[in-house]
Image (cartoon, rainbow, N blue to C red):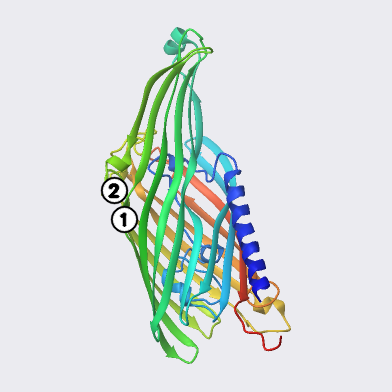
Amino acid sequence: MFKKISGKLSIAAALLLCGISVHAQNGAYSGFTPYSVFGIGDIAKGGTAYNNSMGGVGIATRNNRFLNYLNPAAVTARDTLSFMADLGLTQNNYIYKQGNLKSGNNTFNINNFIVSFPVYKKSAMMFGIAPYSNIGYKSSSNETDPSLIGRTGNISYSMEGDGSLYQIFGGAGATLWRGLSVGAEVVYYFGSLNKTSSVYYENSATRSISSGYTLTLNGTTAKLGMQYEYPLGPDNKITFGATYKFGTNIRGTVDDYEYAYTSSVSDTLRNNTDTLKNNPGQVKFANELGLGVSWNYQNKLLMEFNYLFSDWSGTGMDKVSGFSNIGQSAFSVTSSQSFRFGMEYVPNRSDIRYYYKRCSYRAGAYYNKDYYKLDGHQINSYGLTFGMTLPVFRWYNGLTVGVDIGRRGRVYDNLVRERYVNFSVGFNIFDIWFQKPRYE
């Protein structure tokens, strides 16, 4: 038995190390959107491929076949002695339009790695890593003013950003009495974000300028969760869920630099470091409240609705260099909201004749309001999601695939319209551990 456990732990560790390696070697962009130029970038919706294929719901989800880290109380929804793991991949495709300009981009990344195991009777733990926010953008243009070009020669402008913030979390949950489960987790944020801009003069007699910010950030917070199951009849129940993540100070450094250079000489015009640790409360991660309700009928049909609210207005992110003063639009933080709906249908989990009846089929929809405004305009996104899980081997092992088709922004008010088709793949690993053998 111990050899079996050791072997599976080695496989899980190898998958985790492989995931981190691919993440580190993936290239410049972990995500790509022009809206990531401000603040800490584009905040991930969170969740595994299972959650994302149902519109991102999970606050009121209790499913013993899948890991759900959106609510720490959900870790108690499991079979006794079960070991579970989830490795997720994402592939994102974008098309952008601003005025008469169009462009596109695509990225590929590790999305999450999570493991979970029981502790004692009706309690369990989970540990994992997932992205929290990504920065990825690149733009360039040429000067068109003939009087300026006549004095200095051709001039080109460029902006580029890359980097990610990640979250490592560890949590535990327990079922206190029939129907009520609670959970808590500790979350540690870390990562580095780079934002650069440059003005290049073709005439070597004029010095070109390169400037930017490097944000090396970290922070620690906690998240609480609860779920309550209420039976409506035989194989018919409704579940209420709630989560609350505390706001916390962002610590780390913001390096602000500017250089003037020619082909052979470079001069430092500015090189400052703002130590956020010495200015606690200068910039913060916002708190987050999540509410959800789900209905499960005969373990075949699941429907769920989630609402999330996060107040960024007091985080100071629009007042600190490196977070706010990038790009040409006026950036201000506000409250973010998310409305999510998802459903799952499984014809017959125990069917031994038809494979397709054991598959899980999912669909969902969402509407999000981002945590910032540009020139006073709220940035919104909405989309539809679809997916399914294909059972593999025995137990609850499976392969989950999903697609997210959506849109963000608009083409007027000098904004960018972003259309995307994002794919997600999740490897659901399940086994029974610590069984006492009946025969030696």
Is residue 17 or residue 213 the one in the foreground?
A: 17
Disc 1 marks a residue whose amino acid type is Gly
Which quadrant holds the C terminus?
A: bottom right
* Earlier-in-chain disc, 2 versus 1: 1
What residue is at 37 percent from the left and 54 percent from the top?
220
**How far across and how far down the image is residue 5, in percent?**
63, 71
What residue is at 42 percent from the left and 30 percent from the top?
212
Circle 2 or circle 1, nearest the eye: 1
* Residue receiving disc 2: 315
What residue is at 49 percent from the left and 26 percent from the top?
141
Is residue 69 or residue 274 the one in the foreground?
A: 274
Q: Is residue 135 visible?
A: no
* Residue receiving disc 1: 247
Q: Secondary structure at mark 2?
A: loop
Q: Quadrant of residue 187?
A: bottom left
Distance between mark 2 and mark 1 Cα atoms: 9 Å
Which quadrant holds the N terminus?
A: bottom right
Q: Is the Cβ of the residue at disc 2 closer than 8 Å to that at disc 1?
A: yes
Disc 2 marks a residue whose amino acid type is Thr
